[in-house]
Image (cartoon, grey):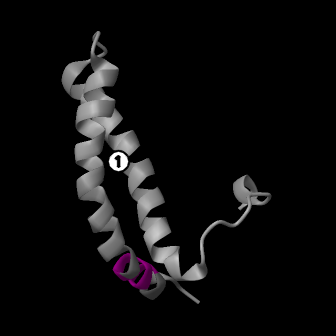
Amino acid sequence: MQCVQSAKKMFPRKFYRLVFAFLMSVFMSFIMSGIITFLNLGFQADFFEQWLLEAFPKAWVVAFPIVFFLAPCVAKLTEFLMRE
């Protein structure tokens, strides 16, 4: 965790799942919506407007609950698949 070693801790531990889901869904939907917007529209004059004001918010609204509810199951599945 070198990228956040010196960061001040801001949230109580009880909010870990919520903060994790928020951050993961923001990063995931930001990157994926940008790529999909580019593939669909190409780099045109209103690319950033279409991406950041249209595609990204819609993607995040879907991504957040998916990550929030599926992350614990995915973590358990990953643990199950790991060798000792």
Residue interval drawn in magenta: 73-78
Residue 27 image position (x, y, % from top left): 44, 49
Residue 30 image position (x, y, % from top left): 38, 42
Question: Which image quarter holds the N terminus?
Answer: bottom right
Q: Is residue 13 magenta?
A: no
Q: Residue at x 23, y 34 (%)?
A: 54
> How many labels, in total?
1
Residue pushed farthest left? 40
Residue 22 image position (x, y, % from top left): 42, 61
Circle 1 SS class:
helix
Viewer-proximal residue among 64 and 71: 64
Residue 37 against residue 77 in the figure, above or below: above
Give the amino acid at mark 1: Ser
Q: Residue at x 26, y 47 (%)?
A: 59
Magenta: main secondary structure equals helix
Residue 4 against residue 49 in the figure, above or below: below
The answer to which quarter of the image holds residue 35 is: top left
Q: Which residue is mark 1?
A: 29
Residue 67 image position (x, y, % from top left): 34, 66
Q: Residue at x 50, y 82 (%)?
A: 82
